[in-house]
Amino acid sequence: MQIADIKSDIDHELVSKEQIESKIEEVAEQVSKDYQGKSLLLVAVLKGAVNTLTAFSQALSIPVEMDFMSLSSYGLGTKSTGTITIRQDLSTDITGRDVLIVEDIVDSGNTLQWLVGDLKRRGAASVEVFALLEKPSRREVEVDVKYRGYDIPDEFVVGFGLDFGEKYRNLDSIAVLKPEVYQGEQA
Ligand code: 5GP
Ligand code: MG
Ligand code: MG
């Protein structure tokens, strides 16, 4: 019996495991300096940002708190719906807190713009953003991403938390799948 390999579904890789790790370490060093002596709360957007949050939090040299939110902007496919709703909210009162949103990818920017506004309205002392990936050519709205990872072209990517039809989140790099994989499922 042949065992299917996740890597055999990849068409091309955009960001390697090593590149992800070194960028996360670089950003974590800067964030550890910037929030020295402060009580930082990391907020990750489920599910895509979980892998980034895990690697990033472990690379920080300061103790931090973590919390999660689940938002819906994308369904199972590859197109943004434009409307954002909270599926699962934070369990932390963020009034007066220094918050750093950890995001997997900024595409149109709609999700992030909405989230930054929402956390500020709750009375956070500061709200900054770390995004591992950005697609600059797809940006529709202004969002200030203070801590930036890699810019990627306008291609639908999977891996390191990012899914296609809920799969491929466990890939350790950022990649584009073979066309037949995307065609095989309902987008
Ligand atoms: P935005 O609101 O910026 O358009 O998109 C936000 C969310 O859409 C991201 O946090 C991510 O969950 C999803 N998304 C955007 N681009 C991609 C992509 O290329 N691949 C995957 N898997 N998800 C994406
Ligand atoms: Mg996300
Ligand atoms: Mg998704």
Image (tube, rainbow, N blue to C red):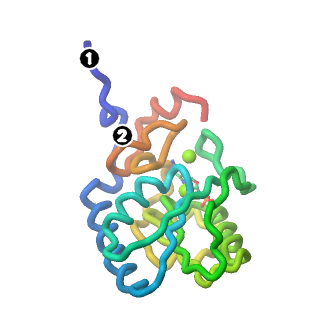
Judging by the rendered image, the residue that carries numbered circle 1 is 2
SS assignment at label 2: strand
Q: Quadrant of residue 58?
A: bottom left
- Give the Cα distance between marks 1 and 2: 20 Å
Q: Residue at x 61, y 39 (%)?
A: 76
**Position of 152 relative to 62 (above/below):** above
Which amino acid type is shown beneath numbered disc 2?
Answer: Asp
Badge count:
2
* Disc 1 to disc 2: CB gap under 8 Å: no
**Residue 147, percent across and down?**
44, 76
Q: Nearer the viewer, mark 1 or mark 2?
A: 1
SS assignment at label 1: loop
Crowding near pointer 1: few (<14 within 10 Å), some, many (20+)? few
Q: Nearer the viewer, residue 99 or 20?
A: 99
Q: Residue at x 45, y 59 (%)?
A: 153
**Residue 77, percent across and down?**
60, 40
Q: Residue at x 71, y 74 (%)?
A: 122
The dot on residue 35 is: none
In the image, the residue with mark 2 has its CB under 8 Å from the nearest atom of ligand 1: no
- What is the quadrant of the N terminus in the image? top left
**Residue 69, percent across and down?**
61, 57
**In the figure, is residue 181 to the left or right of 75?**
left
Q: Residue at x 29, y 54 (%)?
A: 16
Q: Quadrant of residue 137?
A: bottom right
- What is the quadrant of the C terminus in the image? top right
**In the figure, is residue 156 to the left or right of 110?**
left
Which amino acid type is shown beneath numbered disc 1?
Answer: Gln
In the image, the residue with mark 1 has its CB under 8 Å from the nearest atom of ligand 1: no
Judging by the rendered image, the residue that carries numbered circle 2 is 11
**Position of 45 relative to 143 (above/below):** above
